[in-house]
Image (cartoon, helix red, strand yellow):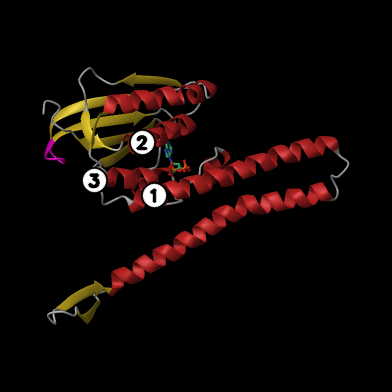
Amino acid sequence: SGANYDVSLRPLGRDGVVLLSFNDVTEMAQAGQMRRDFVANVSHELRTPLTALMGFIETLQGPAREDTAARERFLEIMAKEAERMNRLVGELLSLSRVEAEERVRPDARIDLRDVLGATLRNLAPLAADSGVTLAPDLGDTPATVLGDADQLMQVFTNLIENAIKYGGRDKSVEVTAQIVAQDTAMRGPAVHVSVRDHGPGIDALHIPRLTERFYRVDSHRSRSLGGTGLGLAIVKHILNRHRGRMKVTSTPGEGAEFKVILPLEDSST
Ligand code: ADP
């Protein structure tokens, strides 16, 4: 389809200046469609746990009224469903906050190794519970970037959590930070942070779509692991704000690697 333009003339008062604005109607229509899809997805994602909750409430009010054992079991499931809704709402808020700030460049100088260290410490209990060994190698030179420490922590939390969740028990997750003096894509010095797991990996056809909101390779598996399908969408927006990139590579059956590339600041200035 060819470009479809909507040209409008708006007088700007004072000196009779006229502003010519071209809006690509095709793009606007697509944005509208995406918004509608998003609202439909959110409604569906919220309704699933809500329907379960309503069903259990009804059962507890009726047939299971006197059954203490059933009541305990149902309450446990209800707590899980409520937690899922809570997590979803939390991630939706996080996504909208990140999107709102996307055009504002973060300006704090931070050593990415500190962010990675803090993230790994936070995730140690989850890794231990999951029987996963975290194997960091963060190098011994500072990796100074201009960033928002909380948001960068969110990026690595999401990636490492996924590696733990999808990587499987008794496997290791390697987290490395490496400085690249001249990164061709970044046109300058950069830091490469790699999160690698040894799980089932991801089929190539899914990789380009992973950062879409609510995109899941295996939605049953994601849901049973408590996933919302928003984690990588949040990662993408935070990286955009930091002029960063993400590269995903995977050999199905052997694991996946999520590599984050961020432009490096000169640490000597
Ligand atoms: P979720 O909350 O479902 O984990 P994400 O946005 O974090 O959502 O990830 C999107 C999907 O990408 C997941 O549902 C999963 O199918 C897939 N995925 C992400 N990380 C990995 C990984 N390390 N190994 C295999 N699949 C992964």
**Prevailing SS of the magenta stretch:** loop
Mark 3: amino acid: Arg
Q: How many marks?
A: 3
**Quadrant position of the C terminus in the picture:** top left
Q: Secondary structure at mark 2?
A: helix
Q: What label sits on residue 97 in the rendered view?
A: 1
Q: Residue 12 versus residue 130: which sits nearer the camera? A: 12
In this view, 148 is above or below 1: above
Q: Residue at x 50, y 22 (%)?
A: 125
In this view, 6 is above or below 168: below
Q: Which residue is mark 3?
A: 105
* Span colored in magenta: 184-188
The part of the image, by quadrant, that contains residue 78 is top right
Q: Secondary structure at mark 3?
A: loop
Q: Residue at x 32, y 39 (%)?
A: 248
Q: Which residue is mark 2?
A: 150
Asked if marks 3 and 2 touch (Cβ < 8 Å), the reply is no
